[in-house]
Amino acid sequence: MSNIAGTKSSLTWAVHLSLAALVLLWLFPTVGLLVSSFRTSDQIASTGWWKAMVPSEQNMTLRTGGADEQLQKDGGFVIEGNLFEEPGDAVISVWGTSSRAISDYQAGETAELKDGATVSVQSNGDYLLQSPEEITGKRGQRIFVTAKTPPEFTLRNYKYVLFDPSNREGMAKAFFNTLTVTIPATIIPILVAAFAAYALAWMDFPGRALLIAAVVGLLVVPLQLALIPLLKLHNEIGIGKGYLGAWLAHTGFGLPLAIYLLRNYMVGLPRDIIENAKVDGATDFQIFIKIILPLSFPALASFAIFQFLWTWNDLLVALVFLIDSTGDTTVMTKQIVELLGTRGGNWEILATSAFVSIAVPLGVFFAMQKYLVRGLLAGSVK
């Protein structure tokens, strides 16, 4: 009796566990990027993002003030101050004056240097460097410390990536370039596919079945197969290196799925509505604009989500059709690839840039996801 329709399967718990695992696998990298984008480079290098809310222990190389800061006191020379550029809540536990012995002294102890000089370091970073002779040298004494720093979050990464005019590798221009590619490349195929889908669903003409079969066949054509011939064609007609070529390429690659989804949805609409409209004297264009399009909004939104995400995250088409050495048409995916080469060790910059690039697709998906399932299931059940 377990196979009777409507009864609850005994494997429901396995389905729930699988869904939970998939959600967690998708969620962890996203949360990791978000948290890392607000952390400093030192904290990212010392602890993982999952420890961002607990104090972290870091090894730092700091310097005392230079010789130009020394003062004469009690027959000797003194330099005092704080090792941290921005004194805060960091607590020094041990320190040293050599990279081979970074934990020789506890906080508050005094170390002997050459020529009778001494230096002491307190737990809050305050130091006192004393010497019987005048201190020379442009740079201060190196101090190696092990300090426990509290959790720190900053907006400097976003300010540098998005709003710093001196940053030639910033994401602001690439962000608007990506919008320039994505918005038309989403709207154009929807408009074209909506007209084609209505014709294939509700208009009788010779060869309609063959056209539907051709659309289904085009769904399995690899995008890479058409890139080179399409680029040659674009170069011959003069649109090979610009936004127009990218828009048309994305439109061509997205049309088969768009027509397939919309046609399946429109076929499932009640025939009586269309027939009554024709009896009342409505033309096909009026039926399409005033009846079909409003009723097909779930399918339109479903394809819009897919097309927007594919176009926004696309790198291959951008590399082929947006060839520009000046960087005026560089999209975000290409900019991140370049950052991996030039800033492979700056994880805070990479994490911030990556999260900026996924923030808009996430917003689009969550804003329109209620239409996604309705649009995808269109025409599957009669």
Image (cartoon, rainbow, N blue to C red):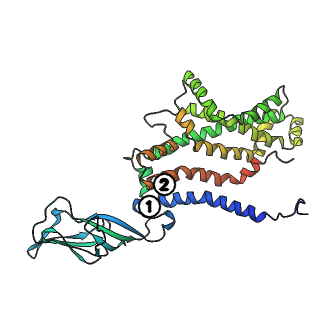
Q: Quadrant of residue 148?
A: bottom left
Q: Nearer the viewer, residue 278 or 52?
A: 52
Is 224 drawn above or below residue 39 in the view shown?
above
Give me the disc on residue 351.
2
Label 1: how many residues lie within 10 Å, few (<14), some (14-19) or many (20+)?
some
Give the image location of residue 215, x and y in percent.
75, 33
Measured as percent of width and height from the top left, residue 146 is found at: 34, 70
Q: Residue furthest bottom?
A: 108
Q: Residue at x 44, y 53 (%)?
A: 349
Residue at 83%, 40% (x, y): give it.
Answer: 267
Seen as rendered, the residue at the extreme top is: 236
Could you say where residue 11 lies in the image, as x and y percent from the top left?
79, 63
What is the distance, in whole Å, between disc 1 and disc 2 at their CAs?
10 Å
Amino acid type indicated by mark 2? Ala
Whether residue 179 is visible here, answered yes or no, is yes
Where on the picture, by quarter, is residue 217?
top right
In which quadrant of the rendered view does residue 275 lie?
Answer: top right
Query: In this figure, which residue is indicated by the disc labeled 1?
Result: 44
